[in-house]
Image (cartoon, rainbow, N blue to C red):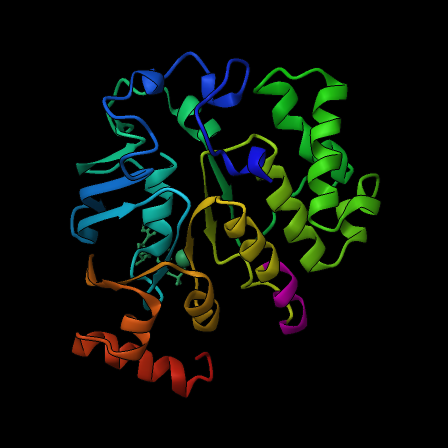
Amino acid sequence: MTDAAGRGQPTEGSPQAAPSLSLEKSPQPPAEGPVLRFESVRKSFGRRHVVLREVSLDVPAHTVTALIGASGSGKSTLLRCANLLEEIDDGAIHLDGVEITDLRTDADAVRRRIGVVFQAYNLFPHMTVLENITLAPRRVLRLPRDEAEERAHTLLARLGLADKASEYPDRLSGGQQQRAAIVRALALRPRLLLLDEITAALDPELVGEVLTVVRDLKADGMTMVLATHEMTFARTVADQVCFLHDGVVLERGTPEQVFGAPRQERTRQFLRRVTEAGRL
Ligand SMILES: Nc1ncnc2c1ncn2[C@@H]1O[C@H](COP(=O)(O)OP(=O)(O)OP(=O)(O)O)[C@@H](O)[C@H]1O
Ligand SMILES: [Mg+2]
């Protein structure tokens, strides 16, 4: 799925070649630096509620970064900041070496390059799966209908939903809806995917099929950042695991290191609680 994985240089006519944001004039070629870089990011809600105090983090190309941490530790906020759904107070976020938190940035151009899938799949109920998936490519990328549909059918087949194109979302299982939401994000051929608790609303027996999709995307080279309470998932799919606590990335390392030999007492406490809750 090389096309969906966003590998390689942008080609003319691809979403990466969108003219507005000066991403093409990146000071460093995309392949060399991290795809996404958080640099001393600060974010508060109101005057006193500091959620991200000082978050610095690099997401290298074709890797999976898992954000873990207690409820309220800021995982979703960090993802929302990367997609410019939240404005940061200080610091910077870079996409392929270009600062996207610069006020002059065209937020829509950034969002075209960053696919997002949230816990609630948010498919439009009055549209078929195919219509849901082709909507943004047609409206945002201005793809002709047949091209958008061809792209959608290819992705649906890859994610095991070939026979669901003309169904309405409520005729799909939760796992199928979530996979359709992933297809919708992939249809814009994003540079990276942000996945926020994409299995949280699913029955346990449906979790596996969504996780398989994430593993397959990783094998295809897609760069992903995911927030999850599924520690087993983080452990098996992530290249790096970041433990958010008190507004910082308190611990970062390979899954083996963070889960197997956590350095920080806070990380150990968190993992103990998770283990007691049967999630590790
Ligand atoms: N729009 C908002 N306005 C005010 N406070 C907010 C807003 N969004 C998030 N917060 C607060 O920021 C903190 C971090 O929330 P966030 O949703 O990022 O946590 P999380 O780590 O994703 O938690 P969970 O694991 O439960 O999803 C919480 O205390 C939350 O109440
Ligand atoms: Mg969250």
Left or right of 131: which side holds 272? left
Give the percent coordinates (x, y) of residue 178. 64, 52
Question: Relative to residue 79, is residue 189 depicted above or below?
Answer: above
Give the percent coordinates (x, y) of residue 48. 16, 52
Determine the residue located farthest toward the bottom in the rendered image: 276
Q: Quadrant of the C terminus?
A: bottom left
Residue 42 falls in which quadrant of the image?
top left
Q: In this rendering, does residue 198 appear at all?
A: yes
Residue 152 falls in which quadrant of the image?
top right
Residue 274 falls in which quadrant of the image?
bottom left
Residue for point 56% across, 30% down: 188
Give the percent coordinates (x, y) of residue 153. 75, 35
Left or right of 184: which side holds 24? left
Query: What span is in magenta?
Result: 204-210
Left or right of 56: which side holds 276? right
Left or right of 86: which side holds 90? left
Q: Quadrant of the N terminus?
A: top right
Residue 209 belongs to magenta span:
yes
Question: Relative to residue 11, is residue 80 depicted above or below?
Answer: below
Residue for point 75% across, 47% down: 169
Name the chief secondary structure element in magenta.
Answer: helix
Count of numbered circles on the image: 0
Q: In this rendering, does residue 126 appear at all?
A: no
Residue for point 46% across, 16% down: 18
Residue 75 belongs to magenta span:
no
Residue for point 42% across, 45% down: 62
**Where ligand 2 lies, by quadrant?**
bottom left
Give the percent coordinates (x, y) of residue 30. 33, 30
